[in-house]
Amino acid sequence: MKKNILNKRKLCLVIIMAGAMFACTAAAQTNPKDGYIITNQNDTIHGTIDYLTETKSEHNCKFRKNGETEFKNYSPAQLKAYRSNNDDFYYFSKDIKIEDKQEKLFAGYLVKGGMSLYHFLVLGKDYYLLEGENGETAQILDASQVGGMNSSQKVELRKNMAQISRVFKEHPQELNNFNEGSFNDKELSKIVVNYDNTYCKDLGDCVLYAQERDVNSQSIKVHVLAGVGAQYESYNLKDNLGENGQSGSTIAPSVHLGLNIDVPRFSKKFFLQAKAQVSYRSYTFDSFRNITSGETEKIRDKSIQADAMLGVAYRLVDPTVNKVVPFVRAGLDLNFWLSHKMDNNLTAEGSIHYYDLNKDVVLARLHAEGFYVGLGVDVPVGNHQLEITADYKNLNTKSASLKSNIIGVTASWVF
């Protein structure tokens, strides 16, 4: 019996540790691709590119030259371009204006030809850049955002259309395509490829590069988050006779790792959240030692607990239009006691009111189920986001007659 209980406890620990290791691994994973870089002196150097997320690749090229063992980081100011051998990606260093701020980025080629099309992603927002045959450029937004735009933002969109018309000035009839299609990778690439194939003036291939970005590859976006928090917990504990319920409260610091999972093809506002949290908690209660005198003794139980949380969240504004994004969320919480220690170990012997939180307790029995509801906000900080949340949580540890109401706050760095 004890062996089975011990195995269950180990299984719980393995699950929690595996979840934490998965989140850490996801943040530190490598994705080597054979490719090459083009320096500012037009030298081509072949080797291996460590291609991670699209956002990271726009700010940094991690490259290892053939014959070397270490990767080196290159900024957009240090390289002209980099590209994979199998044409999975092709980035070119460009000076790009993002909301009145000029920035040099590695912009991803969608199409390279007489007219070229670039794509870049900033804080979850899609940007596209058209470059005409004579060097004219026009930066455009995803037209699917129009429904969530205010009047001033729609004015900016019309200005973008004016810029587009200048790029297409030699063949203005092609502008009709922008009135009918949506501004996404697939539709814009089709417009530019058709334009190049129809009007290209050079001999040979009119389209030098066209990236066929699989729509499904962008159907799920996963962001890793890590942070700290604090919880105020009020609890009620009953003894084994179902009497003498005692109440108390404690402040519990915590650390956590988690995942935010977006399914943008389904919804820009709904997303899933998964989190593994470890906290330190301390409970204080009385236990009777003598039946006649009613003598009591304070007991303090110090424990390390883990929570596995899974839920759904809903953004209150369009994240592709707004920088600060508030959201509400709710989900389920499964709590495990990883360890606990009592200052005074009182057993049933000599006591009529004793608790399951004693030295004979089996940790595998100490688990709780519950739910949480809360709200949060994502705030951009540099190229990442700071996520701040406040939640109410209700947990019930049936095996120990322990009920908890928890109010917690967290701050997380989102990668």
Image (cartoon, rainbow, N blue to C red):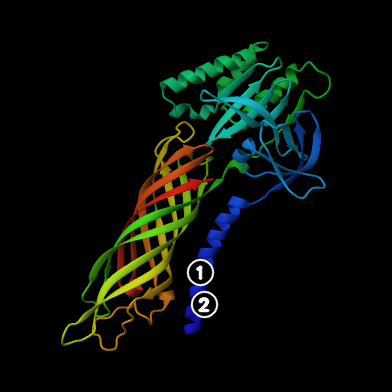
| Residue 346 in picture, x, y percent from top left | 31, 82
Q: Quadrant of residue 172?
A: top right
Q: Earlier in the sequence, mark 1 or mark 2?
A: 2
67 and 354: which is toward the camera: 67
- Please name the residue shown 44% across and 39% down the image: 379
Which residue carries the number 1 mark?
13
Image position, residue 81 (x, y; %): 72, 32
Front one among 132 and 104: 104
Q: CA distance from mark 1 to mark 2?
A: 10 Å
Taking the spot 47% from the left edge, 79% from the top edge, the residue there is 5
User: SS at mark 1?
Assistant: helix
* Three-letter residue code for mark 2: Asn
Q: Is residue 160 visible?
A: yes
Of circles 1 and 2, the one toward us is 1
Secondary structure category for the residue under label 2: helix
Residue 351 vertical position relative to residue 95 in the rendered view, above or below: below
